[in-house]
């Protein structure tokens, strides 16, 4: 048996085509162009690359973007004052603070200042809290992209056993909550989980969000499982990024699997574009004045 591929690249392309049409319609009908502001602090090359990819993707669908760069030495006050300025700028519909911020900064505090209606990365305290209370808010882009990918392939979630390996605020915890909200029975694993392989083997839907190259092998996976690999890992001597799942052995047992690259990554960016468009549409609904 060889698993079918959950093609994030193609699905993201379809979603971008839909977004392009809605962006154009918004421009024609209301004269408003969605605008994303990215905040990049320090000179982390991976963060620089991610922000570049996001800017490029905005361009593909007609969303305007601006990037605010602060040096590695930026103070908490400087970061916070930039966030306040962007919160108040009516031309900006979405704000993305590229993670991670340099270690001397209080990232949790900075993120908590984001206006919820502009938090298109779904990372503020208010957005994350809404996942628990069921209120409407933006949902973190990678978890949202994972659910969207399952939905577009019509993979049922309700009643399934889901195992999420990883419990980070941006990925493991929110994707577990989304699966729970869709009526899966969810187990969350982490670095202190005992006998991880036996927990993983229970999964009908497995989400790997660990950050350890090829840690999960086919021998750990239940035959017929759906395997979502969110991992992006650099490995010395190998070209490109490697997932948390050992693709070749996993695809022999799984029913569905995401490749790395071309699985979760493109879906994350598509969801960022979608959330930015929604933020612009919502701003008109809320009758927030714009200067256009
Ligand atoms: P974090 O480092 O924040 O979290 C990793 C999680 O994995 C932690 O909860 C940790 O447990 C757990 N973990 C670490 N080692 C083990 C182990 N041996 N067994 C079980 N659990 C373990 O990572 P992120 O959530 O930010 O990212 C995870 C991966 O996803 C990375 O490869 C990252 O590059 C990728 N990623 C991909 C995105 C995309 O767009 N596709 C977006 C964001 C991230 P504990 O809490 O106990 O420390």
Image (tube, helix red, strand yellow):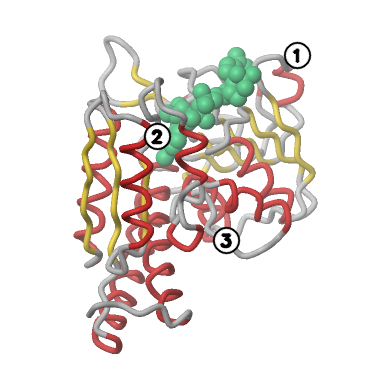
Residue 195 bears which disc, if any?
Answer: 1
Q: Which of marks 1 and 2 is nearer the N terminus?
A: 2
Between residue 131 and residue 155, name the one nearer to us: 131
Q: Is the residue marked by circle 1 packed among few (<14), some (14-19), or many (20+) residues within 10 Å?
A: few
- The picture places residue 207, in percent across and down from the top left corner, at 60, 36
Q: Is the residue marked by circle 2 packed among few (<14), some (14-19), or many (20+) residues within 10 Å?
A: some
Between residue 220 and residue 138, name the one nearer to us: 138
Quarter assignment of residue 77:
top left
Mark 1 or 2: in front is 2
Quarter assignment of residue 48:
top left
Q: What element carries label 2?
A: loop
Q: What element carries label 1?
A: loop
Find out if the beta carbon at label 1 lies less than 8 Å from the nearest ligand 1 atom.
no
Between residue 176 and residue 285, name the one nearer to us: 285
- The picture places residue 30, in percent across and down from the top left corner, at 29, 86
- The picture places residue 261, in percent across and down from the top left corner, at 36, 36
Give yes or no for contact between labels 1 and 3 (Cβ–Cβ under 8 Å). no
Q: What element carries label 3?
A: loop
Quickly name the residue at label 3.
137
Where does the N terminus fall, quadrant-wise? top right
Mark 1 or 3: in front is 3
Q: Which of marks 2 and 3 is nearer the N terminus?
A: 2
Separation of residues labelled 1 and 3 (CA atoms):
36 Å
Quickly name the residue at label 2.
99
Q: Is residue 27 above or below residue 188?
A: below
Q: Can residue 219 be seen in this view?
A: no
Q: Is 79 situated left or right of 152 in this image?
A: left
Q: Is 37 situated left or right of 187 in this image?
A: left
**Residue drawn 54% across and 57% down?**
153
């Amino acid at each position: 048996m060889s698993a079918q591929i959950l093609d994030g690249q193609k699905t993201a392309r379809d979603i971008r085509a839909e977004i392009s049409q809605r962006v154009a319609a918004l421009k024609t009908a209301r004269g408003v162009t969605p605008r994303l502001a990215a905040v990049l602090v320090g000179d982390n090359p991976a963060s620089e690359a991610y922000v570049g990819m996001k800017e490029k993707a905005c361009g593909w669908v007609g969303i305007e973007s601006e990037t605010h760069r602060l040096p590695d030495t930026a103070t908490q006050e400087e970061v916070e004052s930039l966030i306040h300025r962007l919160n108040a700028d009516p031309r900006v519909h979405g704000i993305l603070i590229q993670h991670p911020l340099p270690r001397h900064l209080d990232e949790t505090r900075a993120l908590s200042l984001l206006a919820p209606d502009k938090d298109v990365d779904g990372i503020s305290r208010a957005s994350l809290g809404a996942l628990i209370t069921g209120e409407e808010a933006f949902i973190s882009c990678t978890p949202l992209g994972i659910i969207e990918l399952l939905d577009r392939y019509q993979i049922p979630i309700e009643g399934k056993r889901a195992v999420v390996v990883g419990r980070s605020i941006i990925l493991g915890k929110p994707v577990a909550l989304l699966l729970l909200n869709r009526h899966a029975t969810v187990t969350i694993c982490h670095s202190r989980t005992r006998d991880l392989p036996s927990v993983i083997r229970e999964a009908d839907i497995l989400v790997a969000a660990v950050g350890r190259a090829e840690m999960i092998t086919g021998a750990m996976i239940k035959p017929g499982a759906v395997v979502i690999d969110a991992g992006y890992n650099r490995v010395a001597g190998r070209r490109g990024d490697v997932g948390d799942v050992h693709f070749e052995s996993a695809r022999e047992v799984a029913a569905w699997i995401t490749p790395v690259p071309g699985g979760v990554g493109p879906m994350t960016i598509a969801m960022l574009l979608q959330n930015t468009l929604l933020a612009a549409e919502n701003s008109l609904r809320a009758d927030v004045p714009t200067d256009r």
